[in-house]
Image: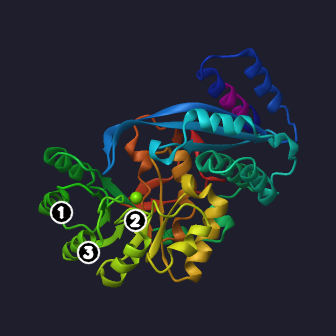
Amino acid sequence: MDRRKFIRNTMLGMIAVSSPISISAMDSATRALTGSKSLKLSFKPYELKLRHSFNLAKYSRTTTPDVLVQIEWDGIVGYGEASMPPYLGESIESVCKFLSNLDLAQFTDPFRLEEILQYVDSTAPNNRAAKASVDIAMHDLIGKIIGQPWYKIWGLSPEKAPNTSFTIGIDKADVVRKKVEEAAPYKVLKVKMGLDNDKELVEIIRSMTDRPLCVDANQGWSSKEKALEMCEWLADKNCLFVEQPMPKEMLDETAWLRERSPLPLIADEFLQRLPDVKRAYGAYDGINIKLMKSTGLHEAYQMVSIARALDMKLMVGCMTETSCAVSAAAQLAPLMNFADLDGNLLIANDCFDGMKIVDGKVTLTDLPGIGVKPL
Ligand code: MG
């Protein structure tokens, strides 16, 4: 089967498995793949099923709502994705509404990425995951047209990608032990904290392994004194950094903590888009960039440049996502001090093949674009 037929069949297959099947959807897909030179956007909801219930300081869940996106141009298809953990305020309904309102057919040149993404950003405020889904699909499309993955387009050396951490969530002692056993292939563990049994969780992990720990408090420590006590305690436990120790609103307290903490502080919930990098400077040592916050790769790459100029540490993270968005984020990995790209490993129904973790390390392929194939 030639490449064009393969792409056509794959896309029709995706529409066929989404329900309900509509003749008009099939017709529009067929029209879209007949070589039109304007951008064609299509999307469908997809519920991610989590391998373990996901327990954070503020809530827990077993699924994550998601929307899969395709942008087609001249018979070539780029894939994208919006993942919507509920605390970020987006939903399948809001993402589908946002995407339905876009008119990408007005664009005939996919290389005018800045112009296209500025239009997408201007159509409504917020909607960061929805905007990221378009950005990711555009990067996949452009990379496929050029025939190269984005890390190569950016001139990056793939061997510089760091190890990824593997997340051990807040849970009962026996479940934590099981998760640590599952995490055996990973060289760095990440611990979610912010509840009363924080120290107990670390003690269980330390009784099983001395691998380095990244700690994510998820805003769970409500006073600067408590946060400092925890940072000092963790400094003796082979801990690399503490992510979002206090609520994002407590910027002055975080700056106070940074002056005293023996461990670097990384901004996560505090930091969404480009202007937030400057705001984080002085209170945090580094930033955790996630595509669902940054509206995608285009702005994420700009955030990297600003953070480097400010001599801040860089981390790339993800939500629970398929290998589509995780592989897109992985294209940035060679620029990073730390990577937390395990979101695809936490779901049971991944529908893409992409970036792999080999011997604990983020490992990029030569596949063009964001480096994925639909399964
Ligand atoms: Mg975090």
- Indicate the colouring scheme: rainbow
- Image spot of residue 179 (x, y percent): 24, 48
User: If the image is split into quadrants, where does the C terminus sit?
Assistant: top right
State which mark lies toward you, 3 or 2: 3
Residue 228 lies, with reference to residue 244, above or below; the image says below
Residue position for label 1: 209
Q: Is residue 100 left or right of residue 293?
A: right
Q: Earlier in the sequence, mark 2 or mark 1?
A: 2
Residue at 73 percent of width and 41 percent of height: 71
The alpha-carbon separation of the residues under discs 2 and 1 comes to: 17 Å
Task: Name which residue type carries label 2.
Answer: Asn
Kindly tell me whether mark 1's CB lies below 8 Å from ligand 1: no
Identify the magenta region. 6-12
- Asked if marks 3 and 2 touch (Cβ < 8 Å), the reply is no
Label 1: state its secondary structure.
Answer: loop
**Foreground: 257 or 340?**
257
Residue position for label 2: 163
Q: Is residue 201 left or right of residue 298?
A: left
- Image spot of residue 41 (x, y percent): 74, 37
**Foreground: 6 or 254?**
254
Q: Is residue 359 visible?
A: no
Q: Is residue 339 left or right of residue 352?
A: left
Residue 217 lies, with reference to residue 130, above or below; the image says below
